[in-house]
Image (spheres, helix red, strand yellow):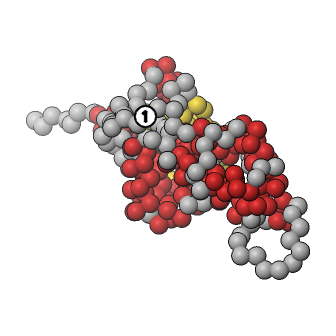
């Protein structure tokens, strides 16, 4: 039922965003009571009956065929990520939810990859955006105010969605915070379609919706996003302003390796080098034993 409800909400949200002019639908004047297309207009564009489409939006229809989904995707002008999300919602849950899923673990080879990147910031995100691992540069760039070993304890792991919406340091870190917030919500929305019965994911979404009105408003938009590349301006408290390109790479375990790079020879690269040097030096100093008193 959860997947069917999400399917209906997603279809309504996409339908409301598509104007009759964009869809090539004649309106013949007059005042319209709904934003975007009417149900019957979308059904006509997709070549399905209005009653069947209404049941889809109401969560009463099951087993929509690939042909119907493809027709709806074309009519709604969905992009590739939205098409995958629609197909996942229509398929429904593939297995029953468990009371508490086991903690996610990072494959040793992925750990080696993150460590081998050295001065290039990298971190590993679980499917609920828990930070499962990071290298020294990744910790320094994204969450230097947190303990480095917090990722090693499942009950203490930072969560990127919580950081973006509930942590003042992370909010100040992004010059265009709304863009980062939209990307985080869109990623969670895509995951919720793939795992509609995940109790920990549902609890995370519920917590954020209660504690952050900004999250709740963006969640209701039903925007979806699957990884990719994005450039962000960042205001780091130690080295000032820099621009990084964040690239997301999927692993076989449904986890994401996020790598942040800077343009070669740019002021941003110089700032990143300074940040890593300051972090490594600071940790080395902290590990040095205190001099003995005579």
Q: Residue at left 40%, top 28%? A: 105
Query: Quick one: which residue is furthest to the bottom in this view?
Result: 30
Q: Foreground residue, 102 or 158?
A: 102
Picture coordinates of residue 136, whole percent (x, y): 44, 35
Label 1 crowd (10 A; few <14 / some 14-19 / many >=20): few
Q: Foreground residue, 191 or 114?
A: 191
Q: Quadrant of the C terminus?
A: top left
Q: Quadrant of residue 102?
A: top left
Q: How many numbered tags mark residues here? A: 1
Q: Residue at left 47%, top 36%? A: 126
Picture coordinates of residue 35, whole percent (x, y): 71, 70
Query: Quick one: which residue is furthest to the top in this view?
Result: 109
208 sits left or right of 189 in the view: left
- Could one spot residue 155 in this view of the protein? yes
Question: Secondary structure under badge 1?
Answer: loop
Q: Foreground residue, 215 or 282?
A: 215
Q: Foreground residue, 152 or 80?
A: 80
250 sits left or right of 157 in the view: right
**Vertical order, 132 against 204 (above or below):** above
Picture coordinates of residue 280, whole percent (x, y): 42, 36
Q: Residue at left 54%, top 34%? A: 256
Picture coordinates of residue 252, whole percent (x, y): 55, 24
Q: Residue at left 23%, top 33%? A: 289
186 sits left or right of 287 in the view: right
- Could one spot residue 271 in this view of the protein? no
The residue labelled by disc 1 is 96
């Amino acid at each position: 039922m959860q997947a069917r409800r999400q399917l209906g909400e997603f279809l309504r949200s996409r339908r409301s965003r598509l104007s009759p002019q964009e869809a090539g639908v004649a309106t013949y004047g007059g005042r319209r009571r709904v934003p975007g297309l009417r149900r019957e207009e979308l059904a006509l564009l997709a070549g399905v009956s209005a009653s069947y489409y209404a049941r889809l939006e109401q969560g009463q229809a099951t087993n929509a065929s690939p042909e119907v989904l493809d027709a709806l995707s074309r009519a709604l002008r969905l992009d590739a990520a939205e098409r995958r999300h629609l197909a996942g919602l229509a398929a429904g849950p593939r297995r029953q939810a468990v009371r508490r899923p086991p903690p996610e673990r990072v494959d040793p080879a992925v750990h080696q990859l993150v460590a081998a990147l050295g001065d290039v910031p990298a971190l590993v995100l679980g499917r609920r955006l828990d930070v499962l691992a990071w290298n020294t540069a990744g910790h320094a760039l994204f969450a230097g105010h947190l303990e480095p070993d917090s990722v090693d304890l499942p009950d203490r792991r930072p969560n990127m969605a919580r950081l973006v919406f509930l942590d003042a340091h992370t909010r100040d870190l992004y010059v265009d915070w709304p863009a980062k917030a939209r990307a985080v919500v869109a990623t969670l929305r895509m995951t919720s379609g793939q795992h509609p019965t995940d109790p920990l994911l549902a609890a995370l979404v519920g917590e954020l919706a209660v504690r952050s009105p900004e999250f709740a408003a963006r969640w209701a938009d039903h925007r979806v996003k699957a990884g990719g590349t994005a450039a962000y301006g960042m205001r780091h408290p130690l080295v000032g302003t820099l621009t990084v390109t964040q690239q997301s790479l999927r692993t076989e375990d449904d986890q994401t390796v996020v790598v942040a790079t800077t343009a070669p020879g740019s002021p941003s690269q110089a700032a990143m080098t300074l940040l890593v040097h300051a972090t490594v030096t600071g940790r080395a100093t902290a590990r040095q034993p205190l001099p003995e008193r005579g």
